[in-house]
Image (spheres, helix red, strand yellow):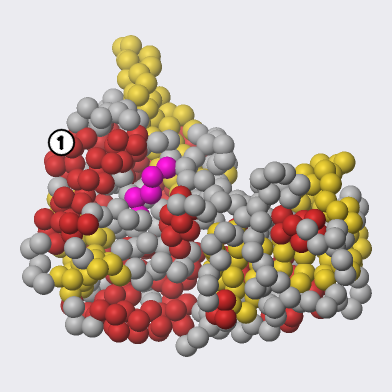
Amino acid sequence: MQHDKVLILDFGSQYTQLIARRVRELNIYSEIHPFNKIPTNLSEYKAVILSGSPNSVRGEKALHPELSELRAKKPMLAVCYGAQYLAHFSGGEVAPSNTREYGRANLSYIKGDEIFFEGINEGSQVWMSHSDTIKKLPSNGVLLASTTDVENAAYKIEGETTYAIQFHPEVYHSTDGKLLLENFLVKIAGLNQDWTPQSFVEETVAAIQEKVGNDKVVLGLSGGVDSTIAAVLLNKAIGDNLYCIFVNNGLLRKNEFENVLKQYEGMGLNVKGVDASQRFLDALKGIEDPEKKRKAIGNAFIEVFDDEAHKIKDVTWLAQGTIYPDVIESVSATGGPSATIKSHHNVGGLPDFMKLKIVEPLRAIFKDEVRRVGASLGVSPELLGRHPFPGPGLGIRILGDITAEKVRMLQEVDAIFINGLKEWGLYDKVWQAGAMLLPVNSVGVMGDERTYEKCVALRAVESTDGMTADWVNLPYEFLQKTSNEIINKVKGVNRVVYDISSKPPATIEWE
């Protein structure tokens, strides 16, 4: 089935992925491409959205997309930078703003009888994020909406299906943002809303069967949502020709290896568990640098996985749980407008010598979509609701060098924290939680004795996609009980702190 597609051109905005996700929430398929790498086959796309950008259209480094094949030929929605670009280079005027146009604002004027603003009333809250402002509309520009401080908050171009807004409809703070996108995509551009989890499953299973045929496929399972849903989809498509390998790298949570293996076997998957804990600990001996630790863990995994894959006769395909943000970020790293923060363990991590063809059932969808697909496949809510856990595991939550004793200590701390969140009914209100073992010893008193032991930091964040995150305001009573339990039960720890940093500027993990 051919779905209507929306092309999103990325100018480096931190919100570009959000635009794509909002469009998909409307059951419309969207794709992100860097503004300077526009796809050649434009007939596939029925509408175009231009994203925001940290750049200024007035600067020497203004980003210039080649819009001649798109402008006035397809319905176009220009957001923030896009709106200013269309104005500045089409007869309008963009100037530095006198007032700081950042944060919440309310629409003070909306032009009547406009399908674009159908169902949206004056006073509706929108989110601004720009230092320039449109002083004069472009040629044939028609004013559609204003806020108290921003006269030209929205406009359209007469004679084209081109709309432009200086606010961000994709963020939650824009109350009617989703409705505005729906008005543009469905009522103006005429796109069908047929991109659903069920349609994704049917089409993906059919595509896997066509691509793989009767070949054997090997997949490394991690216990996480992505690789699990990839396995269930592949299993639905090719059954016993899927060989899953679950490696214990010695850096998993307490009892996770045994528990997850049982869970997988209960799901009817063909899984082999491999305990390679010692091999990973040996590879990490004496390494303190976070990036070197990631690489050592990645290399050890490749070696173990390769050894196991060679034991299966005639395997021709390697399956990976790559999801769409991994794909976007890997493109950004090679010439797109966004920056890369740390090396990714999901994309391109396996070496040429494996000589296997790649199949990635989830590479077109976001994390929240993976969960919706999993639900439509009947995967248990408990497994779908699992917090994300980093590929290098506790290896990047133990700051400094890694030893078996430190791993044991952190596993105990982590178990107390995570089990406590579940007992208090807090686990599902948190996007991700974990404990960090700090390379710090501090003085304490236990009984009549002076101690000089480790400090652990607890971290819990709220997020939708991990791109941004806020720390969670956990109840003091919970933190108090958890701290007491950790210090009383975990030998070697005498101090517990709670991390109240948001992302940005901090990252979710400490390494």
Q: Is residue 257 left or right of residue 413?
A: left
Residue at 18 percent across and 78 percent down: it is 215
The front one of 330 and 379 is 330
Q: Quadrant of the C terminus?
A: top left
Tell me if mark 1 has few (under 14), some (14-19) or many (20+) residues whose alpha carbon lies within 10 angstroms of its own: some
Q: Which residues are magenta?
A: 342-346
Residue at 59 percent across and 60 percent down: it is 35
Q: How many numbered badges does the structure rendering display?
A: 1
Residue 188: where, in percent of width, then height?
A: 74, 80
Q: Is residue 424 left or right of residue 232?
A: right
Q: Image quarter for residue 280?
A: top left
Compared with 321, 302 (above or below) is above
Compared with 481, 111 (above or below) is below
Would you say residue 344 sits in the magenta stretch?
yes
Q: Is residue 224 left or right of residue 479?
A: left
Residue pointed to by mark 1? 282
